[in-house]
Image (cartoon, rainbow, N blue to C red):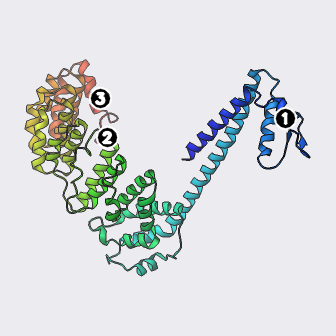
Amino acid sequence: MKRGWIIFLIVVAALGFLLVAFGDTVPEDTAVIYGGAELSPLTQAYQLWGWNIPRYYYYLFVHLFAGYPWVVRVAYGVIIFCCIAFMVLTVAMTVDVYIRWRNRKKFDEIKEKYLEKLKGVCYAEVENLPTEEIKRRMDYKERKWKDWEMRQWANVFIEASRFTNTQNPNLTNIQRAMRMVGFTDYVEAQLMHGKRTVKLKMIQTVRLTNMQLPSTITRLVNDKDDELRKASRLYYMCTSKDDPYVFFEEESKLGLHFSLWDMMELHEIFRKVDEGGLRAPLFVPILQRVANPGIVAFMLQEIAYWGTDQEMRYVMEYFESPNFTHRAAAFTSMGIRRFAESEKSMQRVFHKQTEAHRRLILNALLAIGSGRSVPFFSDTYNSSTSSFTRRTALRCLWMSGAKGKAVFEGLKQKADDADRILFQHVESPIINYDGV
C-alpha cells in the first residue's frame, strides 16, 4: 500500500510539472485587483491566505519559466520533479528503515524476556497449567499490546511452537499463553476484519503455531478468493478429525493453480499430520481423479513419505506410464521409500526408459541398497551408450559396499584410456561423496 501511494504521488507530480512546462495557463489580462492585496512581480494580485498561498507559488512558477523555450521548461520541470521524487523516496526509505529497526528491537526484547520461559511452559510435565501459573512462570505483566507488537509476538510464538506437543494441540500450555497475551484475540480479529494479505499471513501463522481456531477459519474454506480458500483448507486438513481431506479431494483444489509453494506447504502439513498420529489421505483415489500431471507427480513422491506399502505397489504401475514425468516421479519415489519390492520391476522395465530415466532407476536401486543390484550395475556400464549413464552405474558400484567396489576395480583394470576418466570421476572425493 505504501508503495502504491508513493507511485501515485510521483505520477501526479509528473503530470503537474508537464502541464507547467508546456504553457502559461493564466493569461495576463485575467488579473484581478483586490483591495489591500499584495501585488506579485507578475502584475497579478493574490490574497495570501488559505488556498491562495499554494496558488501564488504555483503561478509564480508558471510565469517564472514562461519566456523560456519549451526544451528548457521541460528540463526545469524534470529536474524539479526528480528532486521532489527523491525527497519522497528518501522519506519513505527512512520510515521503512525505522519501522524495520523498531520491529527488530521489539522482537529481540520479547524473545530475550519470554522465549526461554515459553519453552519451559511447553516442556512442563503438567499438560493443563492454569493461566495464573503460566503467568507466574513467565513473569508476565498484563498490558495492552499494539498491533505491530503483536506481529513480533507472532514470530516468538512460531519459534516456541517447535517445542509444543503437536499430538494434542488442544491441551498444550502454549495455547493458554497465547490467549493470556492477547495474541489469540488479535489473530481472530485480523481473520475476521483484516485485509486479504493480512488474512493470508494470519492463516500461515495459525498453522505454524498450531493454534486452534476452527470456528474462525471455517468461514473462509469457501471464500471467493482462491488464495484464502486454499490456505484455510490447508489449515482444515491439520485440525479436523472428522473428514480432514474432504476439500483436498475436490478437483478445484487440485487444479492448474497448484504451485510449487503449495506443494511445499502440503508436504509440511502431511509431516505434521504424521507426527500428530493422524492418518494421511488415501492417495490412490486422488491419483485416479486428478488430471494435472504436475500434481500427480507430486503425489507419487508423497506416497513414498506417507503412503502404505499397498499404495507403493500401486505406484509401480506408473513405471510404464505414457507420461514420462509420472515415470520419473515413480522411480524417485522408490528410492525415497527404499522399497525393495520394486527392485526387480525397475530392472525389468529398464530397457524401455530414456537415458535420464535409466539414471533415476540406478539411483533408486542404489538407495534401496539390497546388494542384489551389483551385477545389474556392471551390465549397465558395459551396455550403455551414454557416458553419463555409465558413470552413474560406476558410482552405484563404488557406493555398494565391498562387493560393489571389487567389481568396480575389476572393470577399471579392463578399461581403456578413454573410459578410465569415468573411473577417476567416480573416485574423486570432490565429485563422488556420500551426500550425492
Residue 109 percent location from the top left of the image: 54, 65
Q: Which residue is at 64% across, 42% downward?
A: 89
Label 3: state its secondary structure.
helix
Q: Which residue is at 71% across, 36% downward?
A: 83
290 over 279 or under it: above or below: above
Residue 341 percent location from the top left of the image: 9, 43
Residue that badge 3 annotates: 425
Residue 239 percent location from the top left of the image: 27, 61
Find out whether the residues at labels 3 and 1 contact each other: C-beta distance under 8 Å.
no
Assess disc 1: are there few (<14), some (14-19) or many (≥20) residues with their C-alpha within 10 Å of its C-alpha. few
| In-image side of 114 versus 436 (left or right) | right
Residue 207 percent location from the top left of the image: 35, 58
Q: Is residue 371 visible?
A: no
* Quadrant in the rendering for residue 212: bottom left
Mark 3 vs 1, N-terminal side:
1
Task: Give residue 257's mark.
Answer: 2
> In the rendered structure, which amino acid carries the disc numbered 2?
His
Label 1: state its secondary structure.
loop
Label 2: state its secondary structure.
loop
Task: Give residue 349's mark.
Answer: none
Q: Which residue is at 32% across, 46% downward?
A: 262
